[in-house]
């Protein structure tokens, strides 16, 4: 049972508490989510607030001294549970939040969507109802974009799931993982990992690629259900420092662990015996994807990997090290694959000093061993070629759909 101070749900302290929980993440944030979900149930003629609150596992708060300790609630055994009046007063006064763990992930994608949308609604409500700092204005703009994009996708009639969401991650760049289709039942699942410049505010562009892949896969294999995922789940190089960050592998290495976790979550969600999962790494996202699969780490989790407009695959030397079928798409006019090159002067520095320079091997090189996919001819030049791989009607998109649905021969 959760014990909260006697004035916890009265007046401005309660409002401050709910706003704090909505912004901070972790178990305490679940209180705001419970309120949001319960309000929806009440409006629909149901109930459930007590059940929601009873299911929340709040962390023990730190011990208090003096007068604060005297007025804190205690359990029968003397152990202190949850926030007391003192903490609520601190929140009302704008004191720093208590450290809390990230809440456990629900088992189903549908449930994750329900709770993440409730978090998004609570965060929007908290930010709209206060005087905002510059950082909070930027956060609100990002959340407005995400909310508007979800509404736009919902109107298409497709199943849309907010699989993961954290607006405060990566210094405010945020996490937004959106599925097109039902991840709980899909037989073909494609995960799109974007590259440089991506933040949660980029959800429009990344989800557009996921939608195009979804539609192409549904055409290629109408007998099987499909879901695609716009995966903004790592701290991709962005902002003023991105031209320097994108030349090294640090962000890709950190993102690789996060990608492994989410791919395993996606694989564990579905009870479909012959389900197929393919991960598509675009641009710097291909470096992240390859590192996630290094030493066969994704074998048994994904069925294939597609590296698109890749500037390099990090420490991976060949497809044999990935343990899954690997496909590669590279437009001849795409300049991005050149930024991670380690030949010439950079290669000499690397060999001389034994340091990591560049983004590793070119996966489109025959020596790497990946299966090349067709791309359009003179469809575009420069960055237009780099951003056009998922364009509707393109040869590369049709090839991606063939890989996703298991038609490898059709992909070539």
Image (cartoon, rainbow, N blue to C red):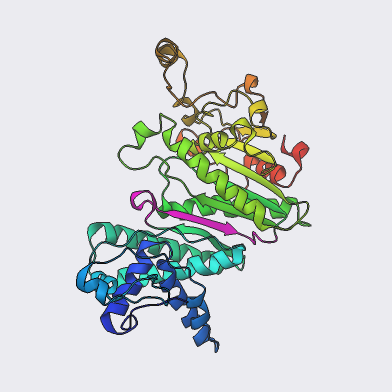
Residue 131 appearing in the image: yes
In the displayed structure image, the side of residue 288 where residue 394 appears, left or right:
right
55 is higher (above) or lower (below) than 160: below
Q: Quadrant of residue 11?
A: bottom left
In the displayed structure image, the side of residue 296 where residue 357 appears, left or right:
left
In the displayed structure image, the side of residue 83 where residue 354 appears, left or right:
right
Q: Quadrant of residue 108?
A: bottom right
71 is higher (above) or lower (below) than 212: below
Instruction: Residue at 57% x, 26% y: name it.
Output: 316
The residue nearer to you, when weighing 146 against 109, is 109
350 is higher (above) or lower (below) than 224: above
The x and y percentages for residue 397 are 63, 44
Which stretch appears magenta? 168-185
Instruction: Residue at 62% x, 53% y: name it.
Output: 266
The residue nearer to you, when weighing 364 against 82, is 82
**Quadrant where the C terminus is found in the figure:** top right
Query: In this view, which residue lies farthest toward the bottom?
Result: 45
Q: Is residue 177 magenta?
A: yes
Residue 151 appearing in the image: no
The x and y percentages for residue 69 are 26, 71
């Amino acid at each position: 049972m959760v014990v909260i101070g006697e004035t916890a749900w009265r007046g401005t302290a309660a409002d401050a508490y709910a706003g704090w929980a909505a912004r901070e993440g972790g178990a305490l944030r679940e209180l705001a989510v419970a309120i949001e979900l319960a309000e929806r149930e009440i409006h629909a003629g149901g109930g459930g607030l007590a059940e929601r609150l009873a299911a929340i596992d709040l962390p023990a708060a730190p011990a208090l001294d003096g007068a604060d300790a005297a007025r804190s609630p205690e359990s029968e055994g003397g152990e202190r549970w949850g926030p007391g009046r003192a903490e609520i007063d601190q929140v009302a006064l704008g004191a720093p939040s208590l450290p809390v763990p990230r809440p456990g992930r629900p088992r189903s994608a549908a449930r994750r969507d329900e709770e993440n949308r409730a978090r998004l609604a609570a965060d929007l409500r908290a930010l709209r109802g206060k005087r905002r700092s510059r950082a909070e204005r930027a956060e609100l703009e990002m959340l407005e974009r995400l909310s508007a994009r979800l509404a736009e996708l919902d109107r298409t009639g497709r199943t849309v799931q907010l699989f993961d969401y954290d607006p405060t991650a990566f210094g405010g760049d945020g996490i937004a993982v959106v599925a097109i289709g039902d991840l709980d039942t899909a037989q073909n699942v494609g995960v799109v990992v974007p590259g440089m410049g991506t933040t949660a505010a980029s959800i429009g562009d990344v989800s557009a690629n996921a939608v195009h892949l979804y539609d192409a896969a549904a055409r290629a294999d109408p007998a099987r259900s499909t879901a695609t995922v716009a995966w903004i789940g790592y701290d991709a190089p962005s902002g003023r420092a991105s031209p320097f960050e994108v030349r090294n592998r640090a962000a890709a290495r950190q993102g690789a662990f996060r990608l492994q976790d989410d791919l395993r979550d996606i694989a564990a969600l579905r009870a479909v015996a012959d389900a197929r999962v393919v991960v598509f790494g675009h641009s710097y996202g291909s470096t992240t994807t390859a590192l996630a699969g290094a030493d066969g780490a994704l074998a048994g989790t994904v069925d294939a990997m597609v590296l698109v407009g890749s500037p390099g695959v990090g420490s991976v030397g060949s497809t044999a090290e990935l343990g899954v079928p690997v496909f590669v798409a590279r437009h001849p006019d795409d300049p991005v694959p050149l930024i991670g090159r380690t030949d010439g002067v950079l290669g000499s520095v690397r060999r001389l000093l034994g340091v990591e320079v560049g983004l590793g091997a070119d996966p489109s090189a025959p020596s790497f061993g990946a299966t090349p996919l067709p791309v359009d001819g003179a469809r575009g030049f420069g960055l237009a070629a780099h951003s056009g791989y998922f364009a509707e009607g393109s040869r590369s998109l049709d090839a991606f759909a063939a890989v996703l649905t298991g038609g490898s021969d059709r992909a070539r």
